[in-house]
Amino acid sequence: MPPFQAGFWIVAPAVGVLAGLVYGLLFNVELLVSATRGAFIGAPILLYERSLLLRGWRDLIRRAATPLFAVATFATYVAMIVVGNAGAGTVLHHGFGYMPNARAAMMISETGFVYALGFSAVAAFVFRVRDLIGPRVFANLLIGRYHRPISEERIFLFLDVTGSTRFAEEHGDLMAQRYLGAIFGALARPVHRSRGSIDDYVGDMALVSWTMERGTRDAACLRCVFDIARTIAAESDRWVAQFGQVPGFRAALHCGSVVTAEIGLERHKIAYFGDTLNTTSRLEAVAKELDVPILVSGDLLDRLGPLPDDIVAEDLGLRRVRGRNEPLRIAAIRHDSIPGASPAPRSAPDRPAPRARQHGA
């Protein structure tokens, strides 16, 4: 488990205790009682929202429309409140001698239930907004990090779904949208595990980025691509049953300096500006031309340093890329235990690589 996830198993109970203490101070309840109930009720809810508890159920309802999501989340929270309160009551009765009997210890007052439900509703709303606009965007908009444009170095991944044009021609646009939606949904957990950010979707392409520190740590940006390949391959039977084929993709990775800024008034977004994005987009076109599933620039390889033993880079030499004065060194990447991200059959041409002067998160 990544350290930031392991740490949340400590943070979640601490936040629950804090919420319980606030309740105790507001409603004159003994603080040990309110803190214990807060920990047992608040921690499961926060762990659930971080996909560390009941992950399969949460992933299922997250794909639902917002009204259905709200109802399912409300029911889940009520169940967690009831179970958490029962657990807290058991500890308070048997461990600290509170309440005359176990039944009384497990009861929750109307005020306590409403408070817990209100806390849960606020949490559900915040996390739903976070899901809709993306965790990184949500956090950065809250703290105003990019209210003034800043220059920073980032790693970018252009992940292009292969064969999507032919799929749309054979099955129609509605089915193609479902197909792409399912694929983009499958990206979420691998990107999260690598501590990256899905910043945009353009047609059948997803734009993922990392800070240099996060993306270069143990080649996390490269491992993310192979993690995506494993995730899709592990459910190949489901893909075939639902869509008639297993998705394939091409990936191009590059790094460099960009200007990151918060733009818009009625609809805020975080956007990137700079030639680094243009170069990444054109590398994806080169990957298509060379029929290479995963292509990485030499600039990024230099920043990654020695690659882990299970990741192999095949030097493809220098390549002139439109928009750059100097040729760009490129390499094909493969994993010892993964044959590669095989492109889907491409009897029909895919869309041309988009211009990427600006991309928003």
Image: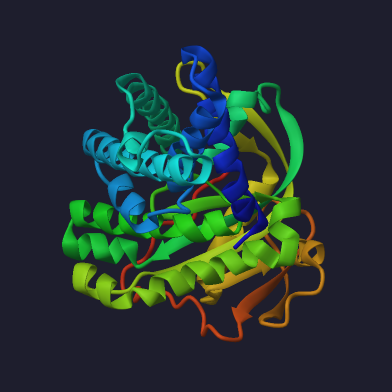
Comparing 259 with 130, the one in front is: 130
Comparing 320 with 111, the one in front is: 111
Residue 270 visible within the image: no
How many labels, in total? 0
Residue lying farthest to the front in this orientation:
100
Residue 12 locus on image (x, y percent):
55, 42
Residue 332 locus on image (x, y percent):
64, 76
The quadrant of the picture occupied by the N terminus is: bottom right
Depicted 263 relative to depicted 310: above or below: above
Q: Residue at x 66, y 67 (%)?
A: 296
Q: Quadrant of residue 301?
A: bottom right
Comparing 149 with 112, the one in front is: 112
Q: How is the image coloured?
A: rainbow
Residue 96 visible within the image: yes
Residue 241 locus on image (x, y percent):
20, 73
Depicted 317 relative to depicted 225: above or below: below
Side of 96 where 181 appears, left or right:
left
Q: Residue at x 48, y 39 (%)?
A: 97
Depicted 10 relative to depicted 137: above or below: below
Side of 242 where 130 appears, left or right:
right
Q: Residue at x 25, y 44 (%)?
A: 64
Residue 146 locus on image (x, y percent):
67, 27
Q: Residue at x 33, y 29 (%)?
A: 108
